[in-house]
Amino acid sequence: MSSDAPETRERILKSTLILLEAGRGAVVRMTDIAKRAGITRQALYLHFSSRAELLIAVTHYVEEKHGSDERLAPSRKAKTGVERLDAYIDAWGSFLPEIHGIAKALIVMSESDDAAAIAWKDRMKAMRHGCEAAIHALSKDKRLSRLHSRDQATDLLWTLLSVQNWEQLIFECGWSHQEYCQRMKALTRRLFVSDETNA
Amino acid sequence: MSSDAPETRERILKSTLILLEAGRGAVVRMTDIAKRAGITRQALYLHFSSRAELLIAVTHYVEEKHGSDERLAPSRKAKTGVERLDAYIDAWGSFLPEIHGIAKALIVMSESDDAAAIAWKDRMKAMRHGCEAAIHALSKDKRLSRLHSRDQATDLLWTLLSVQNWEQLIFECGWSHQEYCQRMKALTRRLFVSDETNA
DNA sequence: TCCTTCGCTTGACACGGTGTCTATTGACGA
DNA sequence: TCGTCAATAGACACCGTGTCAAGCGAAGGA
């Protein structure tokens, strides 16, 4: 796996990523990817046994390229719950544009392919842990609004930060990346942070 | 169109709806629909020129079956902005389970079919008008939170109430229909309604 | 009664995308 | 020089959508 023509494999992953990012909704076929990577369609199957496997590999590729650990470091080292929430939204917000293409492809494929569905659910579960940690930090500071239980708040934050919501706000509503981050922070603060004991 | 074997056409629409609702993610093929409607696959094309057209017809069918006008009446006759927002969420919240199947199918199809994409965007635009009206009512009462402009508030409410968010909260987070409505009302109140001048 | 019309059936087929198989090539290393 | 291995070339099966042509049976009018 790891030793079979790494440059070609990498070239395939990169090509897929580029096409997905550029595609903006257009369906990306195996033929397109092969052409872009400068190999034949059949050769793709020497590296990935199916389209689903390729897409899944791309998600891992993106994740290790823009290391999720370093991305989340500011959030982890935040002193207060509120800071942590803000840092998490900033981190996730700048990650979203990177993963949008592949995420979309995987979501669509999930409808008809079990492996893709499982892989995507797994990624979303990981993302949910981040939400849970932020809410937990808030709760520890006694700043979590009494409006929600911890679970409910996690459900909401997780849903709020979904890829689809980002997509809608950016592409349908015309928000900029900046606006997204800034408003999401304001919104979640209003929603989850109790306003008592201010500083 | 309206005179060609109405019972068969209706049977097709009903069958499609049932399959989509039951399918829960599974792809519904033309063959499946035909079988369920008790006709051949080819006969489907005597009534609908393509899968996209059929799906679009189903959305209209659902909409007129559960008349959107009567559904929205409580929202329209609300006295205050807050009441209007609540009524809108109740109306939309009870409509969502009805349209979930067809909505999902149309969303997935939008990825590869222009007609489906346009039809779905159109439905969402209509739904957005409801959001806009609710925010407008709030604003007229001087109860819209200063945190958002009217457009921003509409963007947010519209996004918050999306089919995908409903789906995630219901199926992934296990919320009940009741919980969804009640929590969405609490959430939007906290988010959009300024707490000054309380009655 | 015959004939037409109409909704539907039957069976065949084209197309596009995925995935498979086999034979072949060409480079590189032992 | 031989074997290995990545990749190619070309053919093919499968599936779902959409099309086409011929036929069938019931309803209705002359």
Image: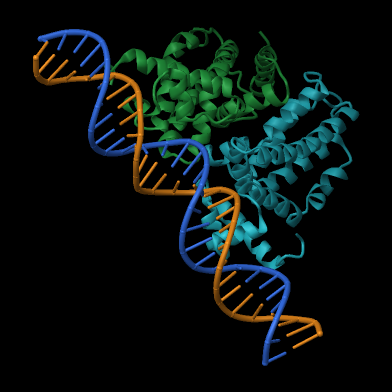
Chain colours: A green, B cyan, C blue, D orange
Position of A41 with respect to B60 (left or right) is left
Q: Quadrant of the C terminus of chain A?
A: top right
Q: Position of residue B158 (x, y in %)?
A: 73, 32
> Relative to the observer, which residue lies in front, A86 or A181?
A181
Position of A55 with respect to D29 (left or right) is left
Query: In the displayed structure, would residue B115 be above or below residue B17?
Result: above
Q: Position of residue B11 (x, y in %)?
A: 64, 64
Quadrant position of residue B3: bottom right
> Relative to the observer, which residue lies in front, B137 or A97?
A97
Q: Quadrant of the N terminus of chain A?
A: top left
Query: In the displayed structure, would residue A160 be above or below residue A85?
Result: below
**Does the rendering let one see residue A99?**
no
> Relative to the observer, which residue lies in front, A191 or A39?
A39
Instruction: Name the residue at 40% across, 27% down.
Output: A54
Instruction: Name the residue at 72% across, 21% down.
Output: A174
Instruction: Name the residue at 57% across, 51% down.
Output: B20
Q: Position of residue A2 (x, y in %)?
A: 28, 17
Quadrant position of residue B46: bottom right
Position of B25 with respect to B106 (left or right) is left
Query: In the displayed structure, would residue A144 be above or below residue B183?
Result: above
Q: Position of residue A6 (x, y in %)?
A: 32, 14
Position of B193 with respect to B77 (left or right) is left
